[in-house]
Image: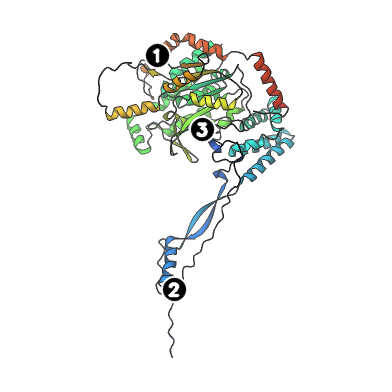
């Protein structure tokens, strides 16, 4: 008897290798607010960020590989369909979180203890650098670091008495990262907010020039505790605050930047707009910023100067479900007093200015990590409200003494309708939407109602001509300057009142309270 053998094709042998994903456990501490900015999604005291995730490869069968396995069980005599790529397996990246809250907390505590145990200058420099990098990566870990009572006294002692300049700068940076803010130097908190407006920034500079003169030729960085800017205001805030320039020097550099950047042919502009949604050369803009601000200077590095004001640069996040502001800071808020607005201090200084001034159609949007930034003026062209919010979180026990909001020009519009229209053109509709998005006066009206009249000063020159954002015509620039000088002459008394307010000395009671705060900080009893 002859046996008949039939060949049965093997079933799909591809199998999965499962990779477990660690998920941090723990619940949010009672009464603790959720973090903001880089601390989004933080619970308890430590955040786990995407940078802690390590990509691990694992082999998984392709869809056709699975399908062939199913067919072979139902139809045993068939042959397995070939894989589309010639292989039944594909490589898939699976994110595995390696750092837990406990890990980050333990590392924070260890870094602080190593710093406290260090004695030599080289050892302290190394430990300060390690702690600074860790706090930049995990901003929420400052809540653990600040619990070490000896940390703030040691940092203050190094910043005030060390003979090594670099060591002093590193100590000031770590103080900023743990959320420590020295009391304001004036009678209360002094805030400067600068609007967007393109080359019309020359209007605001003339106003600030008069403010400097009325204040006894003090620099702008010496008159304010926090400076906030958006778009062209971010450029001015960085030059006046971070670079500590006087207004005359700032005007010279600002006009030079404008002429160099906006002198471009129409053909190259249109081609750039079609290819990269950028009428002007974004690469040239980046090179200009690197040359002026430095290509290796981070936003947080501006906190290393002993008299540097707090700096906040505002951009818009455009790849979120809703537009929202993003604040580049050279500080962190005190532990437990987080901002409503997302932000961070890791970015380079030139990147922050580039993001804040990336006007749609003029310059390309700027991706940093997982966030795509555009001009902050798209959302908040007058950042006074953001500046006020940031200041109150930084110094919750200090009064708002003076707020100076500088605009970069407004048109003189007719108060009455001159014609009756029953409809508007599509161009008019789009123009109205843009105007409403970049409006600055509604914020001004709200601030005028909320703040005392003797502490709020809105300085926004009138324009005799609707200057464009990229205006570089010499005659129109001259006319622009005339408009601002005319405004200064008519509002000299108002500017003088602002200067007096800014230069007022603290009262005896305030001086005693700040002295006690300083003593508590040096004795290890720092408390917000």
Residue at 49 percent of width and 60 percent of height: 60
Residue at 63 percent of width and 22 percent of height: 183
Image quadrant holding the N terminus, namely bottom left
Reading the image, the residue beneath label 1 is: 483
Residue 300 in sight here: yes
Q: Residues within 10 Å of mark 3 (few under 14, many from 20)?
A: some
Q: Nearer the viewer, residue 429 or 116?
A: 429
Q: CA distance from mark 2 to mark 1?
A: 88 Å
Residue at 46 percent of width and 70 percent of height: 11
Q: Give the quarter of the image for residue 360.
A: top left
Q: Residues within 10 Å of mark 2 (few under 14, many from 20)?
A: some
Of the image marks 3 and 1, the number of the one nearer the N terminus: 3
Provide residue 443's location: percent of width, then percent of height: 45, 23
Q: Is residue 49 above or below residue 433?
A: below
Reading the image, the residue beneath label 2 is: 9
Q: Which mark is residue 378?
A: none
Image quadrant holding the C terminus, namely top right
Residue at 71 percent of width and 23 percent of height: 519
Q: Is residue 423 left or right of residue 62?
A: left
Contact flag, marks 3 and 1 (Cβ < 8 Å): no
Q: Is residue 271 above or below residue 435?
A: below
Q: Which mark is residue 341?
A: 3
Kindly state the secondary structure of the residue where label 1 is placed: helix
Q: CA distance from mark 3 to mark 1?
A: 35 Å
Of the image marks 2 and 1, the number of the one nearer the N terminus: 2
Contact flag, marks 2 and 1 (Cβ < 8 Å): no
Q: CA distance from mark 3 to mark 2?
A: 61 Å
């Amino acid at each position: 008897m002859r046996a008949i053998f039939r060949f049965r094709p093997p079933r799909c042998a591809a199998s999965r290798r499962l990779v477990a994903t660690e998920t941090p456990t723990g619940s949010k501490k009672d009464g603790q607010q959720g973090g903001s900015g880089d601390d989004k999604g933080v619970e308890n005291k430590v955040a786990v960020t995407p940078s802690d995730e390590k990509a691990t490869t694992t082999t998984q069968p392709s869809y056709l590989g699975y399908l062939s396995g199913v067919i072979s069980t139902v139809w045993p005599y068939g042959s397995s369909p070939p894989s589309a790529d010639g292989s039944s397996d594909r490589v898939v990246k699976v994110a595995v979180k390696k750092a837990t809250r406990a890990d980050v907390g333990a590392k924070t505590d260890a870094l602080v203890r190593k710093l406290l145990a260090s004695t030599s200058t080289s050892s302290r420099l190394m430990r300060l650098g390690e702690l600074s990098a860790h706090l930049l990566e995990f901003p929420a870990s400052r809540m653990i670091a600040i619990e070490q009572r000896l940390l703030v006294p040691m940092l203050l002692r190094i910043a005030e008495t060390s003979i090594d300049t670099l060591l002093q700068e590193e100590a000031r940076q770590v103080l900023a990262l743990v959320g420590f803010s020295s009391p304001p130097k004036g009678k209360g908190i002094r805030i400067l907010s600068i609007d967007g407006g393109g080359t019309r920034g020359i209007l605001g500079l003339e106003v600030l020039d008069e403010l400097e003169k009325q204040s006894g030729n003090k620099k702008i960085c010496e008159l304010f505790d926090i400076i906030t800017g958006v778009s062209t205001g971010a450029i001015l805030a960085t030059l006046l605050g971070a670079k500590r320039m006087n207004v005359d020097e700032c005007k010279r550099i600002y006009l030079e930047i404008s002429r160099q950047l906006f002198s471009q042919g129409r053909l190259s502009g249109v081609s750039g707009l079609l290819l990269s949604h950028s009428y002007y050369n974004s690469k040239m803009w980046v090179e200009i910023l690197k040359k002026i601000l430095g290509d290796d200077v981070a936003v947080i590095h501006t906190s290393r100067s002993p008299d540097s004001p707090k700096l906040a640069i505002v951009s818009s996040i455009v790849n979120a479900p809703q537009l929202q502001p993003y604040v580049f800071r050279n500080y962190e808020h005190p532990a437990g007093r987080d901002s409503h607005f997302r932000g961070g201090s890791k970015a380079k200084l030139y990147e922050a200015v580039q993001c804040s001034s990336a006007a749609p159609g003029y310059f390309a949007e700027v991706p940093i990590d997982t966030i795509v930034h555009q001009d902050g003026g798209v959302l908040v062209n007058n950042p006074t409200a953001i500046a006020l919010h940031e200041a109150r979180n930084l110094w919750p026990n200090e009064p708002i003494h003076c707020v100076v909001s500088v605009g970069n020009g407004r048109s003189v519009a007719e108060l009455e309708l001159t014609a009756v229209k029953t409809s508007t053109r599509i161009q008019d509709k789009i123009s109205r939407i843009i105007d409403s998005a970049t409006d600055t006066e509604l914020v001004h009206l709200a601030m005028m109602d909320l703040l005392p009249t003797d502490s709020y000063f809105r300085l926004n020159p009138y324009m005799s001509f609707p200057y464009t954002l990229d205006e570089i015509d010499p005659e129109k620039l001259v006319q622009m300057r005339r408009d601002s000088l005319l405004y200064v002459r008519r509002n000299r008394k108002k500017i003088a009142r602002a200067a007096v307010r800014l230069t007022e000395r603290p009262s005896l009671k305030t001086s005693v309270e700040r002295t006690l705060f300083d003593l508590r900080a040096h004795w290890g009893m720092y408390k917000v």
